[in-house]
Image (tube, rainbow, N blue to C red):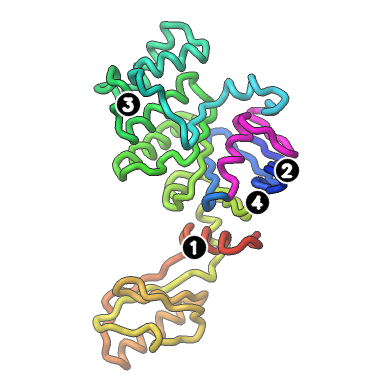
Amino acid sequence: MNIVKVNNLSKEFNGFRAVDNISFEIKKGEIFGLLGPNGAGKTTTIRILTGILKPTSGCAEINNFDIQKNPLEAKQLMGIVPETTEAYLDLSAYKNLLFIGELYGLNKKDRVERASDLLKLFELEESMNKKVKFFSKGMRQRLVLAMALMNDSKIIFLDEPTSGLDVKSARLIKSLIKKLNSEGKTILLTTHNIDEANQLCDNVAIMNYGKIVAINTPEKLKDTIQSVSSVEVSFEKFVDPKNIKFDGVSKVDKEGDKLKFYTRQQEQVIFSLVDYSKSSKNKIVSLNTLKPTLEDVFVKLTESKESNV
């Protein structure tokens, strides 16, 4: 079952097309990523799907409710964490949650139970009565995510959820996203963090200049550009990449103490490297074959305005 349906969606600002005729669907219970560079149209797309902006053309449905025609019904299903959102700084974490629960129309008993459960889930119990203005950025981000869940949302919209966080806080947020998804929550997140998309997402749409240039699972996206398969080798003695050339290699990069050979013919390049090692009496220290990464896909598809699949 598809919980989100986007059809031919566009948004213009003073003649500039920030979102350009995009279409995609999100299945119930999956983590779907919008991946792209800054200015690609990710945040604008989220704002349209959550009813903050009206599209110039096209439509979007949340669980079969048109976000423009049935905004109340659609929004009741959502939890939203915008990139620049903030909790009320002069309230405690606990009071922030109770206040949001009241806005959602929860009765007092449900508000208290839900807030207590979320404080425990997000590891904020010890700081529940502390004012938010004394929280770290990571703690504030966890609280804002908890606030988005006070209405037991069916779908959660996360705009750059780990942006600017330290490594420990970012790992905790990602762990929480996985836990929420395992409990049946559908999650749409925007990110320009390629590793994050690779670790979390069931499906990824890569955006560039307002268009979706590719959409698939991370692994299948990697398979679309086998031209950047490579062989990585480290020799005992230094080798200048300019002095080593083999047939079937499109490019050679030096990465630390290793050389990376981009090729569609990995087996042939391995034989050539072994022959080179013998003839030059330069021992191979390590040798690995590498598939394209999601970063390779991202770079390939966003390297120019005309990129498309």
Q: CA distance from mark 2 to mark 3?
A: 42 Å
Three-letter code for the amino acid on which mark 1 is drawn: Asp
Instruction: Name which residue lies at 43% across and 23% down.
Output: 147
Asked if residue 274 is positioned above or below residue 110 in the image, the reply reads below
Q: Is there CB contact under 8 Å for labels 3 and 4? A: no
In percent of width and height, residue 182 lies at 44, 33
Q: Earlier in the sequence, mark 2 or mark 3?
A: 2
Q: Which residue is mark 1?
A: 296
Q: Earlier in the sequence, mark 2 or mark 4?
A: 2
- Please indicate whether residue 188 sits to the left or right of residue 288 in the image: right
- Characterize the local packing of mark 3: few (<14), some (14-19) or many (20 or more) Cα atoms within 10 angstroms: some
Toward which corner of the image does residue 303 lie, by quadrant?
Answer: bottom right
Question: Which mark, by number, is residue 211?
Answer: 4
Mark 3, mark 4: which one is toward the viewer?
3
- What percent of the width, then of the height, locates residue 193? 44, 50
Q: Quadrant of the N terminus?
A: top right
Q: Which residue is mark 2?
A: 8
What residue is shown at x 40% (from left), y 33% (from top)?
179
Numbered mark located on residue 133 in the image:
3
> Disc 1 on helix, strand or loop?
helix
Name the one closer to the observer, 117 or 138.
138
Mark 3 or mark 4, which has the lower sequence index?
A: 3
